[in-house]
Amino acid sequence: MIQTLLLLEDEEVLGRVYSRSLREAGFTVTWLKTIKDVQQFMEESSADGIILDQGIKEEERSGMSLIPVLKKKFPKAKIAMLSNYSAFDIGDQAMKAGADAYWVKLNTTPSSLVRNLQELLLEKHRK
């Protein structure tokens, strides 16, 4: 079963590498770079999984602030937050906002991203 993913990542290199690895693993990926693009995506599309860059900021919004909005729009989607920081409070804040997982970019190679996401989505189908 092909699963659709939303990847919000403003870093060009990471976005290219992550989206290519996810596609090679069989996912359909929509890679977006801005919060404005995500708002349009929410009006027109759906997703089984969502990967958000915690560090993205645009006007009053951030990757973190998108979690509850996306959870409400796509209640069955699994949401993972990616961050440059391993600080416990950021991960805790993401989980309290509704994220299903929190991964540190430095520790998240393309292959581990695919593996982590497959495990996360498998949990979704077990419930």
Image (tube, helix red, strand yellow):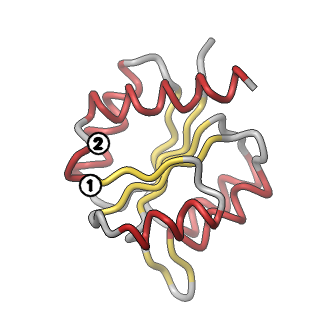
Q: CA distance from mark 2 to mark 1?
A: 6 Å
Quadrant in the picture for residue 89? bottom left
Give residue 100's position: percent from left, percent from top.
58, 48
Of all residues, the one furthest to the bottom in this rendering is: 60
Q: In the displayed structure, does residue 74 sit left or right of residue 27? A: right
Q: In the displayed structure, does residue 15 sit left or right of residue 106? A: right
Q: In the displayed structure, does residue 100 sit left or right of residue 32? A: right
Q: Residue at x 63, y 11 (%)?
A: 1
Q: Is residue 88 above or below residue 50?
A: below
Q: Residue at x 61, y 67 (%)?
A: 66
Q: Is residue 17 above or below residue 37?
A: above
Callout 1 amino acid: Glu
Q: Where is mark 1, residue-wise?
A: 12
Q: Residue at x 55, y 44 (%)?
A: 6
Q: Residues within 10 Å of mark 1 (few under 14, many from 20)?
A: few
The disc at residue 16 is 2
Name the one closer to the observer, 80 or 88: 88
Give residue 109's position: percent from left, percent from top.
23, 38
Name the one closer to the observer, 97 or 25: 97
Give residue 63's position: percent from left, percent from top.
50, 68
Quadrant in the picture for residue 24? top left
Callout 2 amino acid: Arg
Q: Residue at x 27, y 52 (%)?
A: 105
Name the one closer to the observer, 42 or 91: 91
In the picture, which quadrant includes the C terminus?
top right
Circles 2 and 1: CB atoms closer than 8 Å = yes
